[in-house]
Image (spheres, rainbow, N blue to C red):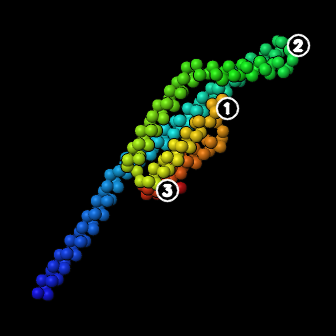
Amino acid sequence: MIAGGFLVLGAVLGFLFNLTLERHRSSLAAGARWDGDIREYAAALIVACDALLEERIRRDAFTAGAVWQLQQQMEQAAEQVEGLAPASLDLVADRFRREILTGRYESDVFKHSLDRQAAEWRRVSTLMASLDLVAPATLRLMAHKLVRTAQDALNAPDDIDLPEAQVTAVADARNAFTDSVRRYLRVKEAPA
């Protein structure tokens, strides 16, 4: 009878141990199943945010080039025009600068940059939806912070160069997101 009691107790303990072990294996397998997707979505999101920032910087360079060209033309015109008050030249220069800045939207280079930016935003939206489905809350929070920071930077006035503080803020958000993904995936730093 005592032996039968130990047999039943051993069977129950074995069953509980196997149940606990199976649950642990199942949770590890479920986590591992999504790790590849999370890694892929996170990497693609970082690349897309970098591309968005790059397009904005490209448009800033295009605008700066157009303004520089205008300034060169104005200096040449100023040398040719004598007797015109400097204040009048400044007014003419301001008018031309406004025309350049508004006219750049008609440029094919500028239009293509805006089209690429719109395509990247669609990509970011898809990636965020994917991360919202499979990533844990901490990663989703950091991903949303990265996207918000990039959006704030890209919503800066288009007639001035992107402020360095906003470029730095995007880089900081990108690094924080990268670090949180690395922690989640338990990626160790390679020895230097």
Q: Can you identify the residue that label 3 sits on?
A: 189
Taking the spot 63% from the left edge, 19% from the top edge, the residue there is: 103
Would residue 190 appear left or right of 133 to someone viewing this image? right
Q: Can you identify the residue that label 2 sits on?
A: 83
Indicate the secondary structure of the residue bearing disc 3: loop
- Residue 28, how many percent across, how many down? 33, 59
Binning the other alpha carbons within 10 Å of mark 2 as few (below 14), some (14 to 19) or many (20 upward) gives few
Binning the other alpha carbons within 10 Å of mark 1 as few (below 14), some (14 to 19) or many (20 upward) gives few
Would residue 83 appear left or right of 122 to someone viewing this image? right
- Residue 156, how many percent across, how many down? 62, 36
Binning the other alpha carbons within 10 Å of mark 3 as few (below 14), some (14 to 19) or many (20 upward) gives few
**Residue 182 showing in the rendered view:** no
Circle 2: residue type:
Gly
Taking the spot 41% from the left edge, 38% from the top edge, the residue there is: 126
Work out how far the residue at label 2 is from the one at label 1, CA to CA, in angstroms. 32 Å
Indicate the secondary structure of the residue bearing disc 2: loop
Q: Can you identify the residue that label 1 sits on?
A: 160
Query: Is tag 2's residue or tag 3's residue first in the polypeptide sequence?
Result: 2
Circle 1: residue type:
Ile
Q: Quadrant of the N terminus?
A: bottom left
